């Protein structure tokens, strides 16, 4: 059986993607680091709708936790594999560069960029062996144009886009696609501290996006219909930056 694994799947965009993939009939593994209550709520919603899912807690920034969790999961499902990996886990630690602390820089890169590396490397082997897979990396508008106060976040997301383009070329012959989604302002917990009323004036569409809109794009990229799309960074931002 083919599974989807969504990191940071308990809230926001990750939650919406997990729900959408499960609604399309794919069993979903919901990764989270600490918010078990939110992860359980996501799982309960999937099951209430007739879908299949499970929880898999680990910190993507820890190579030891990634290895331990995936080894345990694979031992439980020796005949199955993760065919769709959504690298969504990420954090913000905004600050202007001159005042940015070492930990603010490292925490953001450790989760977003190193987490992508540790988990994708671990999951990729089975995709290549089975000759098929989908890797979907959640990047950001910040990684395309940069945003002030987010040098760390912009650096991590820009690196994800570069890694997406490189890895796509490495694995295309084995029918594994690698794409990035670069959302603009999406109404989630992560953007809850932003001034939505002021920011939406800068967006041609006149509003923040919905997590479900990002999830719809992710679901398409995970589908068989998207087999010829790879190495792309697709923006979903209401026309804010093109």
Image (cartoon, grey):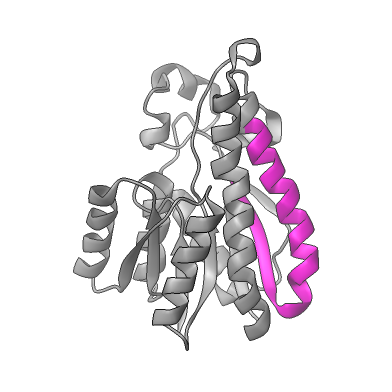
Residue toward you, 227 or 151:
151
Residue 120, image quadrant = bottom right
Q: Which residues are magenta?
A: 154-182
Lateral position of residue 129 relative to residue 202, left or right:
right
At horizontal 26% and vertical 49% (from top left) the residue drawn is: 38
Counting from the top left corner in percent of width and height, residue 126 is at: 61, 78
Lateral position of residue 72 relative to residue 157, left or right:
left
Residue 29 shows in this picture: yes
Residue 40, image quadrant = bottom left
At horizontal 75% and vertical 47% (from top left) the residue drawn is: 162
At horizontal 23% and vertical 49% (from top left) the residue drawn is: 37
Counting from the top left corner in percent of width and height, residue 207 is at: 44, 31
Question: Magenta stretch mostly in which secondary structure?
Answer: helix
From this view, report whether residue 103 is shown above or below residue 131. Answer: above
In the rendered structure, does residue 152 fall within the stretch colored magenta?
no
Residue toward you, 210 or 55:
55
């Amino acid at each position: 059986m083919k599974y989807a694994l969504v990191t940071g799947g308990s809230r926001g965009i990750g939650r919406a993607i997990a729900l959408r993939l499960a609604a399309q009939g794919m069993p979903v593994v919901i990764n989270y680091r600490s918010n078990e209550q939110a992860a359980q709520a996501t799982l309960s919603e999937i099951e209430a709708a007739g879908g299949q899912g499970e929880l898999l807690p680990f910190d993507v920034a820890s190579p030891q936790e990634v290895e331990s969790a995936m080894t345990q999961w694979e031992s439980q499902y020796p005949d199955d594999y993760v065919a769709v990996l959504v690298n969504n886990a990420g954090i913000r630690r905004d600050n202007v560069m001159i005042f940015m602390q070492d930990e603010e820089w490292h925490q953001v890169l450790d989760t977003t960029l190193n987490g992508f590396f540790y988990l994708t490397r671990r999951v990729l082997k089975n995709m290549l062996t089975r000759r098929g897979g989908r890797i979907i990396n959640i990047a950001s508008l910040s990684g395309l144009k940069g945003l002030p106060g987010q040098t760390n976040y912009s650096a991590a997301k820009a690196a994800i886009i570069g890694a997406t383009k490189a890895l796509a070329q490495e694995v295309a012959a084995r029918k594994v696609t690698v794409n990035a989604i670069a959302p603009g302002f999406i109404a989630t917990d992560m953007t809850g501290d932003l001034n939505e009323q002021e920011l939406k004036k800068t967006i041609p569409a006149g509003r923040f996006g919905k997590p479900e809109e990002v999830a719809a794009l992710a679901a398409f990229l995970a589908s068989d219909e998207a087999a010829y799309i790879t190495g792309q960074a697709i923006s979903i931002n209401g026309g804010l930056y093109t």
